[in-house]
Image (cartoon, rainbow, N blue to C red):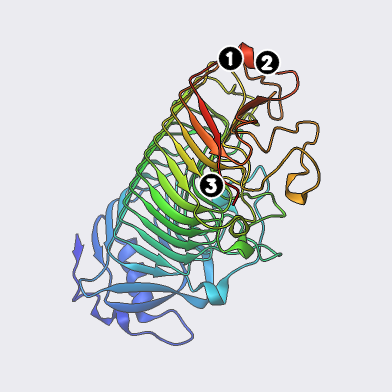
Amino acid sequence: MRLAAAFLAAASLAVPGSESTGEATIRRALRAGTGVIELPAGEIEISSELSIAAGAHEREIRGAPSGTTLRAARGFRGRAIFVCESASHVRFASFTIDGNRAQIEPRSGLPPSNQPFAQFTRGNGILADHAAALAVSDVRFINVPGFAILASASRDVEIDRVAIADSGSRNARGRNNTTGGILLEEGTEHFRITRCEIRNVRGNGVWTHSLYTSPRNNDGRIASNRFEQIGRDAIQVGHAARVQVENNTGRLIGFPEEIVDVEGFGTPVALDTAGNTDHSAYVGNRFEEVNGQCIDLDGFHDGEVRGNACINRQATGRYPNGHYGIVVGNNNPDMRPEGIDIVDNEIDGAIYGGIFLIGSHNRVLRNHLRRINLAHCEGSATKPACNYALDQPDLLRSGIYLGTGGPRPAPARGNVIEDNEISGFGISKHCISAAPGISLSANTITRNTCKDDPAE
């Protein structure tokens, strides 16, 4: 069934203070059977969520050739502009969603640890719950207070050429609460997020997340997306398996500074990891101006981190939340930090060390670590930025640091560290170092070059 543009021509006429003619017409079309719904041209105010009925299938919602904008009304009520529950083969294409963030933004924190975002966060753009074969292409999202797209417990999700700008809300302190970008959660599987432009988002740009008790997200690809001015993580792969993150680019991660969730320890990261994440690969991604970490591998194991770059060109004060270049961690109790290849990556400008390594049977090869230890930490408490873990004086000032573990013991041993080029402040003396109790000789360390950079 096709609902032609002529059938919806009256939809652009709004009725102030009530459900607009256009909104009512769209609702009638959504209640119909399968087919294509061509949205009316112009701007249409939406007062409450537009629902695609459970069990619906073979639906396409697309904008008019001359352009369609669906805008949340001042008193909008609902989880999202579009809500798609237990439906299959639904496609959204070629229109704009304006979330009217300035008028309806809530001030809220994160959901309880046992509650998915789909049951907590309101004011999203598109919410899909237990959907199958969902596609979103050439849709523009602006001023969305929640997530632009939130897919929960769904499968076969394709998001392509989506543009997101000026979105995400804040907590009571005015910091980001993770919202604004694309979230796939609760075991979403077989997904693709490609060729999207994500700009000025307060929270995460692209994020996979599941509760500890839920299935992991799996079999996904996040590729060729562009990020600019992201307040939290550009990309986070959380609690996942078999996810390829490749050829993404970005700049100004962790900016603006005032939106960073410092009280919640939400350090911005270009490529972040959480939960139990394995058999995944971060390859060929490049970021510039990162006010945080370049790559966080907390929970990452049996995977590949190859050919990525983070370049910081500004003075040290530009990065108040600056951190390590690459960090391996083990917060999740179901994984061990093993089988990681960290190869051919470039870190140029890290406030502290270049690579923090724990665990065993990992390979750190041919990485280029430049301008390490911009904070000029020297193993004492004389600088406020350097007075962390004083029992490990080399922790913040080393090119590569071999640690004892994270929250759980995971001593660095049986790793191969070869052919890395490392330079920075004091690096000739603190190139590859180990925590007390960790033996460098328990690892294979050869053919690494180390030198000091001129003081900056």
Amino acid bearing label 3? Gly
Q: Give the answer, above or below, for where 252 lies relative to 308.
A: below
Say few, some or many: other residues with alpha carbon within 10 Å of mark 3 (under 14 / 14 to 19 / 20 or more). Answer: many
Q: Position of residue 261 (x, y in %)?
A: 65, 56
Q: Residue at x 55, y 20 (%)?
A: 338
Q: Residue furthest bottom?
A: 16
Task: State which quarter of the image contains the N terminus.
Answer: bottom left
Q: Position of residue 69 (x, y in %)?
A: 35, 73
Q: Residue at x 70, y 23 (%)?
A: 404
Indicate the quadrant where residue 279 lies. Answer: top left
Indicate the quadrant where residue 427 lies. Answer: top right
Q: Give the answer, above or below, for where 212 lies relative to 264.
A: above
Number of callouts: 3
Q: Which residue is mark 3?
A: 349
Amino acid bearing label 1? Asn
Q: Does label 3 or label 2 sit earlier along the sequence?
A: 3
**Callouts 2 and 1 close, C-beta under 8 Å:** yes
Distance from Cα at disc 3 to Cα at disc 2: 28 Å
Distance from Cα at disc 1 to Cα at disc 3: 26 Å
Q: Residue furthest front?
A: 454
| Nearer to us in this view, 213 or 433 | 433
Distance from Cα at disc 2 to Cα at disc 1: 8 Å
Circle 2: element type: loop
Q: Residue at x 61, y 47 (%)?
A: 374
Q: Position of residue 232 (x, y in %)?
A: 56, 53
Amino acid bearing label 2? Ser
Q: Which residue is mark 2?
A: 439
| Nearer to us in this view, 163 or 64 | 163
Q: In the rendered image, is residue 439 in sight?
A: yes
Circle 3: element type: loop
Q: In the rendered image, is residue 156 in sight?
A: no
